[in-house]
Image: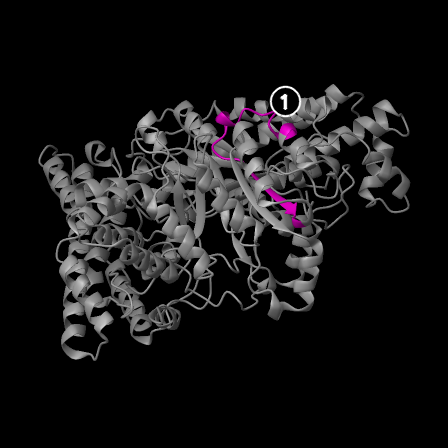
Amino acid sequence: MTSYQELRKEARAFLPVSAQNGICQDPVFVQAYHDVEAKFNELVKEYPEFNDRNALKLRRAFYHILPDIIPVKFFLNSPFYFCVGINGGWAYSPARACFHGRSDAGAFYNSAVPAEDFSIYNERRSNRFILCCGPFVDAVHHLPPFTTIFQKGFKGILEETLAELEKTTDPAEREFLETAADGLKTIRVFQKKFVAEAQRILNTESLTPEQKKFMSMAAEAAERCPWEPPRTFYEGLNTLLFVREILALTDALLIYSLGRPDALLHDFYQADLAAGRITPEEAYDLISRFLIICDSHYDGYKMVTAYGDHELEIPVTLGGCDADGKPVYNDITRFIIKAHREHDLVFPKLHCRVSKDSPEEYIRELATDTWNGRCVHTLFNDDTLIPGLIKQGKTLEEARRYICAGCWASCPDSVENIDDANYYSLARVLEAMIYQDEGQNQKYGHKFDPIDSCQSLAELRDLVTKNLTVFMAETMRLLTTYGRLYTSVCPHPTYSACLEGCIPNRKDETAGGAKYSSRIITLAFLANVVDSILAIDHVCFRKKLCTVPEFLNIVRNNWEGAEDLRQIAMKAPYWGDNKPESKELGSHIMNKLLETSKTLRNERGGEYCLSIWIYREYRYWGYAMRALPDGRRTGDHLAQALNPSDFRNKESATTTINALSCLDYTDFASSNINMTFDKNNSTIETLCAFFRTFVEMKMQLLQPNTFSREELEEAKKHPEKYHHLIVKVCGFSARFVALEPEWQDIVISRRHY
């Protein structure tokens, strides 16, 4: 329909022009944001110091301010009511400005954290040992509790909150529950604002017949849903957008997921069909408009070069299984894949759950898009992730309903708010052991043992592993100790009330109120560490070409004048070659890290889980890292996620997947590989077969690309002919022609299987 383009124009004219930290373009909404901040800052004067109870008082006051100031927005070519001027993700929000961005929030951390510990933590972050998206906790990546809201509506959650309030006289518990209740009531007020605005538009604006139908649909549905649970496919689809946005506004959250439409909405769709309320064509039209809104935040053809460029963090989870373990693949799955393709979308991200039982049609659809250069999918393996979630303590029912987070993580819906953006660089620790900088032990709060005196592979392996595990444990203890302060700055009472456990526990999820409180530590650059240890073994212990100090001095000199030795070092076994040496070493390191993580609890009382993935840091952290014994030179990018190093890897796809399957991935929260298949040597059938192999080998996450180098080189020269090419960069996809030249070169230089 021509109105699809009109919808895109409406949305793009309103939503942020920047993917990162963008602000709504409508001056009315921008002024409203500033007015909220000004009003809030007046109230802050009554609560000069942060503590748990003051933070809740501030949150409650914020709830009361919002509805009188923040307007609501409709796109006339869509029936969805959800937009309050932001769109989740990284967009600017008055809520975040009022809580995270306040100067006294920073002052609170400065006063509450001992100066020495704060200095150590900040030095570790700024020197690329760790990354944490917030002060001691991940304050960024949150998942909406859709299951609870679909079952109870916000009204049912409020009723449970008020009933629990009657059972306690404890002041802190009452304040949490009363604040959550006020937040839920605020959501009802906003829902009514949408009713009034839809009616105003119907009465005052000149509308096309289609626009009039959409506004009528919204005015009727917003009277009840999602204050009450959705009853139709349309109401359910709108609820996915509404929940994501309203909780982002009320509780200062950056919320990313749009849940599992094909699992959550299929029964509604079937009931609507049976009752004659909808046709398949009408359902497809609604899905098209739903998806187009999610792709309209900025011009995906425009080259932007900031760290967060092209990243919108809007994922949809497809496929997987239902509560009985039966595969989910239905009309809604088909419609989403088809609409994403036909409307040439990059976002939302399509996170596709697969298993050995996945229908062939589903697998083929994913392979077809990938082979045609629409690399917008990430494959999540149910046959590994579900057993892994059960191993973490989740029930089978909870594990089966997991949804996928911004880039990689999997989280059972409505039972926890997982904290997952905490990266730990294994390669940076090895670098610190090799380059003994003066004063680094005090600056980083750890004595990195030099490896120059090692006399055997076992001694070298154990010394490196000791530093990796001890330094990780020390960092996790910092996160645990001072992560507890977060609830004193930014509690999430309304959001918490929607998570299982928080109401009966009468505690915010930031204080450990939810049923589960996992925290993920993401391990990065395993290949660089394994390859470096084996290179030293190969050159110094096996071939005895030089001593370890001599070899390390050559590495420290960035391999200058020693290319022959560098080539010999790169003949050593390496991660991904499927040789016993590399598999045994990689398994040893990871198992020791797992053992260490299991001895610690996080700031909310939950467990620490390990993952293996990496975002853009494989490039940006690589810029600042010095040469390593694996043959990598200073400034070169590092290995991506679980991948072998591109500059070392010469193996076939089958050999690589066999090699990487040496780990038991049910012990990890998520682990990702990014594989590029040469279009000249592959077909849709071979991709289908490989996807099946990936599942059978018990891997976790696969991000597939299919191109030829010649095609990508041509796209660099003639971008106007290749707008259709979409590449998986890391945790996100982008049009190849919109990437800056260096990112294009990195994609081209990857190992093409």
Residue 555: x, y in percent?
81, 40
Residue 747: x, y in percent?
65, 53
Residue marked by disc 1: 588
372 horizontally vs 78: left or right: right
Q: Is residue 652 visible?
A: yes
Residue 605: x, y in percent?
36, 29
Residue 678 against residue 742 in the figure, above or below: above
Magenta stretch holds residue 504: no
Residue 71 against residue 532 in the figure, above or below: below
498 horizontally vs 227: left or right: right
Residue range corresponding to the magenta coloring: 658-679
Q: Quadrant of residue 613?
A: top right
- Binning the other alpha carbons within 10 Å of mark 1 as few (below 14), some (14 to 19) or many (20 upward) gives some
Residue nearest the viewer, comparing 385 with 87: 385
Q: How many marks?
A: 1
Amino acid type, callout 1: His
395 horizontally vs 634: left or right: left
Residue nearest the viewer, comparing 128 with 310: 310
